[in-house]
Image (spheres, rainbow, N blue to C red):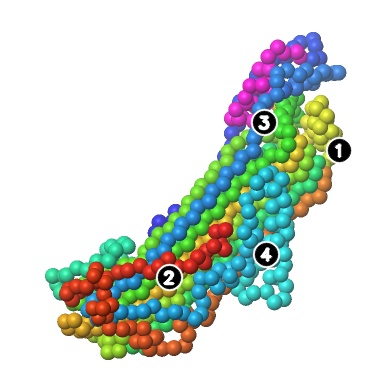
Amino acid sequence: MRAPQDLVDYDPSLHYNAPGPQWVWAAGSSSLAVDTPDIAVAAVKHAMPGVVHPAGQTVHVSIPAPAAQVEHVGQEMEPAGSVVEIVHQVNWLNDDDYVSAGGSGLTFTPIDGNGADIPSLLNAASQFDPLGHAGMPGSAQAAAEFIVEAAQSIKALAAAEQADGGHDGVFVAVGDTIEGTFVNGELLAQAPVLADHLPELPASGSPPAAIVTQTSTSLEISVEVHAGSNTLENTAVVNNSWLTATVLATLGNHVEINAVIQTNVWSDVDAVGSSLSGWTLDPDQVTQSFNIAAFTRIDPIKDAPGASSPATDDFPKAWAVTVIHGDLLMMNWIQQISFVSDNDVHMLSSSGVKMTITTGENVAENHVSIDDLGSNYDLIFVGGSVYSGNFIQQTNVLLDDDLVGSVAGFQTTGTAALSTSGNLLWNQASITTIGGGPDTIDALPDAYRQLGNSLASGSQTMPYDVLHDGNFAGLIGIRVLYVTGNLTDLQYVKQVNVLGDSDQVAVALNTATQAFPQADWDVQTGTNVLVNIAQIVDVNAIAQTYVAGDHYSDEILIQAELISTDPQFGSQNPDHLVNEAVAFLTDEHLTPSMQTDDPTHMHVTHDAVPADPMQSVTS
């Protein structure tokens, strides 16, 4: 498995210094009248280097002279638009095989379990799904309501888990901000690397997804079974830089929430017959679970190497205003779901040849990478409220309760190895917020309130104290975006992996020719890998946020590990269960395609499609 999706932090050290503007001064006058907006536009372009300015801008030019007048030239420029991207990726695979190989003369009827199963594991995982089957918002207003309601639901779940009686294996962190990397509830300086924890997969020489019988000239007699080793992987990377500004001001409220919910649920209770007690079992092969979450806040101004506030008394003398009438929405809605059923049944014996059987090794992958690169302003003024929500929800569900037993009389003098575990469940999430920290949020100054009234009336008069905001020091002109309604920023990633890999293996001696007890055996039913990786990079106001109404900010982390200890096959002897479930395979039980005189006879069938336990996940 190749996994190059290492998450890295935002690098704010990229700088660009534009050349100085070319000004043409009018002597003997306190005002400058221009026939074309070239000079004013050049000033605005200098303020935002590298940004394309479409034709048609409302440009205000002021000359620093006594009793200066303001001249309006040009037309309104095109404002930024809303951006909505919807990604829904689903993998659905049923690979439930029945394999009868060798000359045992037996058939093996699958044994019904009486413990944990996929629906019950999904039900356990649903306890940590506060958003439920959230429908995708259909409008900017619905997106704003989703952010508020989701924040309330997630915070209520976190409060319930923090109270007495919360679940074991659950970690919760809540605060205005969360900093650092948390691994299974522990704050660490560095996150583990996926490549270091991937289980060892079967040898590369094994043919994938195939069943092969071959005669060796060296008379190597062996049976090698790969019934697991499935890989389910979801990866999503979202870079939201669609709309950024140095200063953000709102006449309404400011709501911000960053939330990560990670859940690993599994059952890996295996039943191995006592007759196989002499087989080599790797004690280090156990199921591993990782929930990794990183919250990072970056101040591009303070964190940039050698950054410092410009020491200048120069402030903007020009400004351009563009208006959006109504709401502005930025939304990425991503859902990635993989469901794989690989519950195999094997009736095996050695036929005196080298035999490799692969009924697992399925791969289900969902990948998406989105870069929203849009417009950059010096000032964004919002007449309504600002809603910002970044949500990552990751769930892995694994059922790997295996049964391995032997038919009475089975024995082997060759080497024998058995692996029924060694699975990996991996959730890794990162939310990086650039700008907009709590230290940069202040009450709306009077000058900005005056600007709001001016913009609402359509006059677009720029108060002196706004132009002399220290955040604009050193700029010749500023670009202003005015949104009359709400500004909503919603980034939502939901990732789910569900794998059923409960294999049942019965081994027996060959009765068709000779027993071949000297055969080497290697049976692997585990080593499955379930991976969710998600990263959101969200760019907010770089320097300052002014709020006239209420400000609400929360960051929430919930990490849960739920392990089932209820054995699927109860406390009965696996060998006894196997012997009860086998029967002699007579001609009357064979279909025409299965009848053969070949002593190395093998047949494979597929069970019927199982019931739909994923209905509750995909609906």
Q: Nearer the viewer, residue 122 or 608?
A: 608
Which amino acid type is shown beneath numbered disc 4? Ala
Describe the element under mark 4 as helix, strand or loop. Answer: strand
In the picture, which quadrant includes the N terminus? bottom left
Can you identify the residue that label 3 sits on? 79
Image position of 68 with respect to 483: above or below: above
Packing grade of label 4 (10 A; few <14, some 14-19, many >=20) is: some
Which amino acid type is shown beneath numbered disc 1? Asp
Q: Is residue 397 left or right of residue 277?
A: right
Describe the element under mark 1 as helix, strand or loop. Answer: helix
Image position of 88 with respect to 263: above or below: above
Q: Is residue 189 visible?
A: no
Residue at 64%, 30% in the rendered image: 48
Can you identify the residue that label 1 sits on? 446
Residue at 67%, 31% in the rendered image: 79
In space, the residues marked 3 and 4 are separated at their CA atoms by: 39 Å
Can you identify the residue that label 2 sits on? 501
Residue at 50%, 49% in the rendered image: 368
Among the two numbered marks 1 and 3 on one chain, the one whose residue lies closer to the N terminus: 3
- Of all residues shown, which one is farthest toward the front? 588
Can you identify the residue that label 4 sits on? 173
Among the two numbered marks 3 and 2 on one chain, the one whose residue lies closer to the N terminus: 3
Q: Is residue 67 left or right of residue 364?
A: right
Q: Nearer the viewer, mark 2 or mark 4?
A: 2
Describe the element under mark 3 as helix, strand or loop. Answer: loop
Q: Position of residue 208 (x, y in %)?
A: 31, 62
Is the residue under label 4 in contact with that under label 2 (CB below 8 Å)? no
Packing grade of label 1 (10 A; few <14, some 14-19, many >=20) is: few
In space, the residues marked 2 and 4 are separated at their CA atoms by: 33 Å
Q: Which residues are magenta?
A: 32-57
Q: Nearer the viewer, mark 2 or mark 1?
A: 2
